[in-house]
Amino acid sequence: MKRYSALSLLAGALTGHRRWSQAWRTPELRKSYDVVLVGAGGHGLATAYYLAKKHGIRNIAILEKGHLGGGSVGRNTQVTRSNYFWPESAAFFDHSLKLYESMSVDLNFNVMLSQRGILTLAHSHHDLEALRRWANAIQVNEIDSELLTPGDVKRIAPLIRMDGRYPVHGGFIQRRGGISRHDAVAWAYARAASALGVDIIQQCEVTGLTIAGNRIRGVETSRGPITTSKLALCVAGHTSVLAAMAGIRVPVNSMTLQAMVSEPIKPCLDTIVLSPIVHMYVSQSDRGEIVLGGGADVYTSYSQRGGVPVLQETVSALTELFPAFSRLRLMRQWAGIVDITPDTTPLMGKTPVEGLYISGGWGTGGYKAIPAGGDTMAHTIANDSPHPLIASFGLDRFASGALIDEGAASGVAH
């Protein structure tokens, strides 16, 4: 793998950028692999990388029915944070944030991490008390969190309307939170995994699973059968569809979650602002666009378009809190598919079928969990035993009742 650097960039410029090597290989599909991962999104790519890097397993295939990064990893608002309430969630997502903090160096690819902070607003005394308890819980989990007065909020985000329909009574901020470039994260893991020998097979749809004696034996694809003893499903909103091929019913509901951006303007918002009450969060991209998202659409769907009512509600919430943005033109809108569990906590680990693993149920937290999701799933697959950080995230919690309800920390309505 050619190392990127300022010198290599200069050399590329002097040669007209005609001699850059391919970022990742385009291999032919083989008949057998030690591990097969379904889904060349963030979690599939990260899992493959850590399997090869940390566990020495190189005979790996990632199967993608479309193109690399064409699913939810490229259809989100790029937020990275670890301000979760329960200790299990906090430990997992803070591990992910720490991996994000070193990712550009570790993978030799600039993922443009900008730790500008994420500010959560309180619009009543009741909200403020709830946020106080949330912030205290985060601090108990040894994660940074700071309660803010209305004056603090105004200094951090001067354009916020403090005394409108939703008066701002304060809030709390995680200053290590921020945004990064989602395409760069996918490309970084793809490049690093490919250099370690992982085969990334695009335009290869999984059509069935081969199971014998309650054990995975292989997978049927649009490009022919593959034999393998370990298969992991990293397919976000299509988790239930793939799991059904193995006769497993998973407790997830797939819905559309949309986002949108305005025309670019000069820098005016240097943090992420989230309001759980009006179901809106907003940041400004490095290109100057105002990026905003809201709650999930209220119906089950595999669409990547989203509905007009949620779009209207999100824009209305934005202009209520930031009147100055009301004159901006909406430039484009997109949506991704989120698979939401009853307790809005990920679904990770082994399944009743030997050799079959699931990394799903991410809801609105899939992007921020990519590094930790890949690291812990790689450990789980390599050792056939759940990583300690995800031991509580398995399917068995729905039978035992040991749920981890992170509905509030999701930040938006589900």
Image (cartoon, helix red, strand yellow):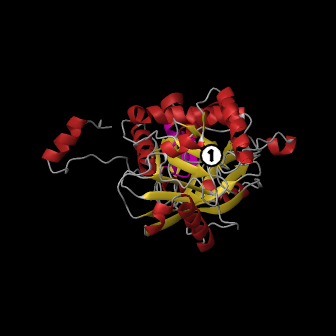
Give the x, y percent position of residue 91. 64, 31
Residue at 49% x, 43% y: name it: 155
Q: Does residue 46 show up magenta in the picture?
A: yes
Q: Nearer the viewer, residue 84 or 28?
A: 84
Give the x, y percent position of residue 390. 68, 35
Instruction: Tell me: 122 left or right of 375.
Output: right
Q: Is residue 217 above or below residue 103?
A: below
Amino acid on which disc 1 is placed? Ala
Residue 59 appears in the picture as rendered: no
Q: Is residue 36 above or below residue 309?
A: above
Circle 1 Cα neighbour tier, 10 Å, few/some/many (<14 / 14–19 / ≥20): many
Q: Quadrant of residue 332?
A: bottom left
Q: Residue furthest bottom?
A: 308
Give the x, y percent position of residue 67. 46, 59
Residue at 36% x, 55% y: name it: 287
Q: Does residue 383 show up magenta in the picture?
A: no
Instruction: Tell me: 204 left or right of 359.
Output: left
Instruction: Tell me: 325 left or right of 374.
Output: left
Q: Nearer the viewer, residue 149 or 293?
A: 149
Q: Quadrant of the N terminus?
A: top left
Residue range of the region highlighted in magenta in the rendering: 29-49
* Secondary-structure class at tag 1: strand
Residue 178 appears in the picture as rendered: yes
Residue at 52% x, 39% y: name it: 177
For label 1, the residue is 232
Give the x, y percent position of residue 325. 46, 62
Q: Residue furthest left?
A: 14
Q: Nearer the viewer, residue 293 or 35?
A: 293
Q: How many marks?
A: 1
Instruction: Tell me: 11 left or right of 2.
Output: left
Q: Is residue 193 above or below residue 64?
A: above
Q: Quadrant of the C terminus?
A: bottom right
